[in-house]
Amino acid sequence: MLSQKNKKKKECTKMKKQKNKQASEQLTINETMPHQINAPSFDGTGIKMQAPFVNKHGVTIGDSMYASDNSPLENWTKDTDPSIMAGDEWVHPTNDIGWNTTENRELLERKRKPQASPFMHPTKDVSKGTD
């Protein structure tokens, strides 16, 4: 009886760990990043949130952890060439601070349909002159 109880307890613990792992792996909800208070929503823009990736230096980009054992930032010396961190391999396409700028938010807004779009012509103002 006791061993069966222990077995059940171990299974329960294992299930909790798996659930926690899944929760920590999911960074987005409804095409936004809720853990970043000023992050824009990509919902309705046609841009899909992308998963984190590992670059050629072994650094995970886009996981919102901001520290990696392999990162030049964590291993900086006077001999480190800063250009090693230049290029697209260091920028995540959807989880990047650059989306918080006014210019990039405007880009997202232009990609969204107007809220009244089912009742509007996309390019013609049919109400013009009806007043």
Image (cartoon, rainbow, N blue to C red):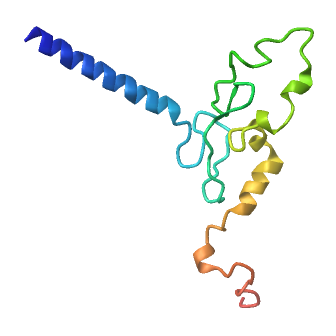
Residue 32 lies, with reference to residue 27, above or below; the image says: below
User: Quarter-wise, where is residue 67 in the image?
Assistant: top right
Q: Residue furthest bottom?
A: 130
In front of the other: 34 or 86 = 86
Tell me the quadrant of the picture where the N terminus can be found: top left
Q: Position of residue 30 (x, y in %)?
A: 53, 49
Q: Residue 53: x, y in percent?
A: 65, 35
Above or below, 22 against 121 in this view is above
**Residue ranking furthest to the left:** 1
Relative placement, left or right, of 115 versus 1 is: right
Residue furthest toward the front? 56
Residue at x-position 75% and y-position 41%: 100
Residue 8 position by quadrant: top left
The quarter of the displayed image where residue 6 is located: top left
- Report the side of 111 relative to 20 (left or right): right
User: Can you give x and y, in whole percent of width and height, for residue 22 in the image?
Assistant: 45, 32
Task: Give the residue at x 80% y 43%.
Answer: 101
Q: Position of residue 51 (x, y in %)?
A: 60, 40
Residue at 78% x, 11% y: name it.
75
Which quadrant is the C terminus positioned in?
A: bottom right
The residue depicted at 87 percent of the width and 8 percent of the height is 77
